[in-house]
Image (cartoon, rainbow, N blue to C red):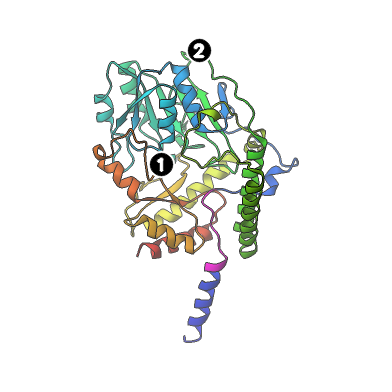
Amino acid sequence: MTGATPSRGVAVLEERRRRFIPALPTLWPGLLSPLTAERPPPFPLGAPRVTCFYFARNAVFHTVRLLGLAGREVLVPAYHHGVEIAALVAAGAVPRFVRVDARMRLDLGDLAAKVGPRTGAIYVIHYAGFPQPMDEVRAVASRAGLPVVEDCALALLSADGTRALGSMGEIGIFCFYKTLPVPNGGALVVNARGVASAAPTPAGAPLGSTLAHAAGALVANAAYRLGEAGVALRLAARGASRAVRRATGLRPISTGTSRFDLGAVHLGMSRLTEVIARRVDAAAVVAARRRNYFLLLGRLRERVPPIFAELPAGVSPLFYPLLCEDKARVKARLAARGIETVDFWRRGHPLCPTGAFPEVAALRRRVLELPVHQDLSPEDMAFVARCAWEALT
């Protein structure tokens, strides 16, 4: 017994030093090979009426123009990122906020009560890949003669049973780089026959930004797969990138910003994103994400009550929302173990009165995003679960 304890301690130290768990899926070189077979494009890339942009927020902006919502109210969830609200406002729409409860469910009663003569559309957000009750939302919209916009920026590849999220509203909006290892990309899908026009053809994506983001995803993959050597390579690459930016003044167009840039609203998705997306096995991505979510749910539900206690058929979870009383402390503890997390939606848009929505304020204060993406193995998830349990104590 006495000889076993030090060896376990050494193993734990080795694990802490070498393991790296990225927050987002990474790009591996095989997906860039011309020998890799293309697959049928996942929805929405194969949709009949789809326009692809650099950002999903560009699709939000152009949705206002397509539906003629300038000067009209759009009912939007009080729980939101903020950039989608900025895009609506920049295009001329007027957001009116609807309650979201502590389980990230849209309050249908509040939604129906806020429909008025100025209302032009209902905007729905599917959080972390989990569907809102679209049949009920559509019933409210139908009674008022309103179009529904589905924001699936967090729900690419996800479905409500057999119905793809983003296919049930008049408009579907998607983000690719949150779910797939691509450098950029968002989409606007027109599902309604009554929307006769289409979004304008976007300009090409900036090559420098595309290559910079792809290179970052490649070195993140190296850090994940190669341990200490890969982490060192990633740190060196980041340092070199900063040096190049300082020397040249060039700044890639970041996909991680929460600021809406009207000057970038015309930018389209890169050809590289499409090439990678057509080589991804979408069914395998969904299966891996579901498995990883189940593994965290099984290990953490007794420690912290889960927001989503079940994983309905068709759902492709974007992340595991962990509720923390001290989010900054838990995030720092996980980072010390090599686990990247995301401080999910800490702030909303300033137009939204925070005091009016206490459940939303609590979600912003407490939700930390744990990765469940397709790169990660069951062993990785066991490590994440154990570290999360320890970080919460």
Name which quarter of the figure residue 49 lies in: top right
Task: Confirm whether the magenta stretch covers residue 271.
Answer: no
> Badge 2 local density, few (<14 within 10 Å), some, or many (20+)?
few
Q: Which quadrant holds the C terminus?
A: bottom left
Q: Does residue 333 show up?
A: yes
Of the residues shown, which amino acid type is indicated by label 1?
Answer: Pro
Of the residues shown, which amino acid type is indicated by label 2?
Answer: Ala
Cα distance in 3D space between marks 1 and 2:
34 Å
Q: Does residue 27 show up?
A: no
> Can you say whether 29 is above or below 205 in the image?
below
The region drawn magenta spans 16-24
Residue 312's label in the rendered image is: 1
Q: Secondary structure at mark 2?
A: loop
**Foreground of the two, 252 or 69:** 252
Q: Secondary structure at mark 1?
A: loop
Q: Magenta stretch: dominant SS?
A: loop
Give left or right: position of 365 versus 28. left
**Foreground of the two, 339 or 37:** 339
Estimate the x, y position of residue 105 in percent, counting from the top left. Answer: 32, 38
> Can you say whether 237 is above or below 150 in the image?
below
Q: Number of marks in the image?
A: 2
Q: Residue furthest bottom?
A: 2
